[in-house]
Image (cartoon, rainbow, N blue to C red):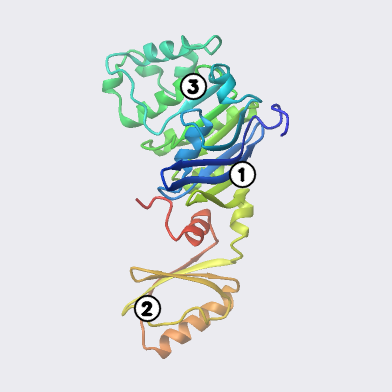
């Protein structure tokens, strides 16, 4: 095991069972200082269970967790003083104001930041005297982030931190996370937004059925797809009876609800062959476009689902 200074957050052979269901099946993680690890996966993949074990909310059935060189079993109170957690949904007292909430959370810790400074940092200074019951969903999300930051944590757990935020507020949260990393902080992030994962994450772990199915930097994970581009199109009369896999340069075919996506290595060879094939079948082509592979394309290729599928 590396020293806590170099690897503040790690897990080895992590397992969690619910009866006969193995929700997390032998996951290994390591998050160095000044980095962000994004945990991605379809609903039910095990990512929420994993992050809750790392946060100390669930007890694992097997494996080892180290947080800042400490274990939850022996030193849970000491760990809580040094981490910040933003849950996917945070219930706060309706009748307290924004400033009162931040002062309350600051009182839980021996050391921390000035609540007024944190309030300004998350863009809620104008709402200082507003009761939480009158905040919008996005404002509640920013307040929850402020509660996670008020202790001056060394590790920040962020579960869907920008859900419900407008684009400007999302970018502000991204800047806060980047500043936190720059100051030496460690971040574990779950998100349904691929652009968020690509911007914030130094490394990604994609989980499905409780196992890690891909890991690496965003660029490395995308490169592992092996595709030069994604060709996406619709065929007027359907495409189920056409074999696109035999076209030159095609690595994979995805056909759903009349839309076909081809992962290809040589776009300049694939496109003419595709047009010839459809012409020979007397099929009309519409809405054709190509793009460079993205993290979303990798995710669909690995799991068969889009990240935001319910």
Please tell me how crowded label 3 is: few (under 14), some (14-19), or many (20+) other residues with Cα within 10 Å: some
Which residue: 68% across, 32% down? Answer: 7
User: In what element is the residue under mark 2?
Assistant: loop
User: In what element is the residue under mark 1?
Assistant: strand
State the separation of the CA atoms marked 3 and 1.
26 Å
On screen, residue 234 versus residue 109, left or right, reads left
Q: Quadrant of residue 182?
A: top right
Query: Where is residue 14 shown, x and y percent of the image?
Result: 56, 40
Q: Which residue is mark 2?
A: 239
Residue 176 visible, this orientation: no
Tag shown at residue 203? 1
Query: Where is residue 222 shown, x and y percent of the image?
Result: 59, 56
Query: Where is residue 149 shown, x and y percent of the image?
Result: 51, 21
Q: Nearer the viewer, mark 3 or mark 1?
A: 1
Q: Are marks 2 and 3 in contact (CB under 8 Å)?
A: no
122 or 141, which is in the foreground?
Answer: 141
């Amino acid at each position: 095991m590396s020293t806590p200074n170099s690897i503040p957050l790690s897990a080895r052979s992590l397992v969690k069972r619910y009866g006969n269901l193995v929700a997390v099946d032998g996951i290994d993680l390591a998050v160095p200082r000044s980095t962000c690890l994004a945990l991605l996966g379809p609903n039910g993949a095990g990512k929420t269970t994993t992050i809750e074990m790392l946060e100390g909310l669930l007890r694992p059935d097997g494996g080892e967790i180290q947080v800042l060189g400490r274990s939850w079993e022996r030193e849970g109170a000491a760990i809580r003083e040094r981490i910040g957690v933003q849950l996917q949904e945070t219930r706060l007292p309706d009748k307290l104001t924004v400033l009162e909430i931040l002062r309350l959370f600051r009182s839980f810790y021996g050391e921390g930041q000035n609540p007024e400074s944190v309030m300004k940092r998350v863009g809620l200074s104008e709402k200082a005297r507003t009761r939480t019951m009158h905040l919008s969903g996005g404002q509640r999300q920013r307040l929850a982030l402020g509660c996670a930051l008020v202790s001056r944590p060394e590790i920040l757990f962020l579960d869907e931190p920008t859900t419900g935020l407008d684009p400007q507020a999302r970018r502000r949260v991204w800047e806060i996370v980047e500043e936190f990393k720059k100051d030496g902080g460690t971040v574990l992030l779950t998100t349904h937004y691929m652009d968020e994962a690509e911007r914030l994450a130094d490394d990604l772990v994609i989980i499905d059925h409780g196992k890690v199915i891909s890991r690496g930097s965003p660029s490395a994970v995308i490169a592992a797809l092996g595709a030069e581009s994604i060709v996406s199109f619709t065929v007027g009369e359907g495409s189920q009876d056409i074999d696109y896999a035999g076209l030159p340069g095609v690595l994979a075919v995805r056909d759903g609800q009349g839309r076909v996506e081809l992962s290809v290595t040589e776009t300049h060879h694939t496109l003419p062959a595709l047009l010839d094939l459809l012409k020979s079948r007397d099929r009309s082509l519409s809405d054709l476009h190509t793009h460079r592979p993205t993290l979303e394309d990798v995710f669909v290729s690995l799991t068969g689902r889009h990240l935001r599928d319910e």
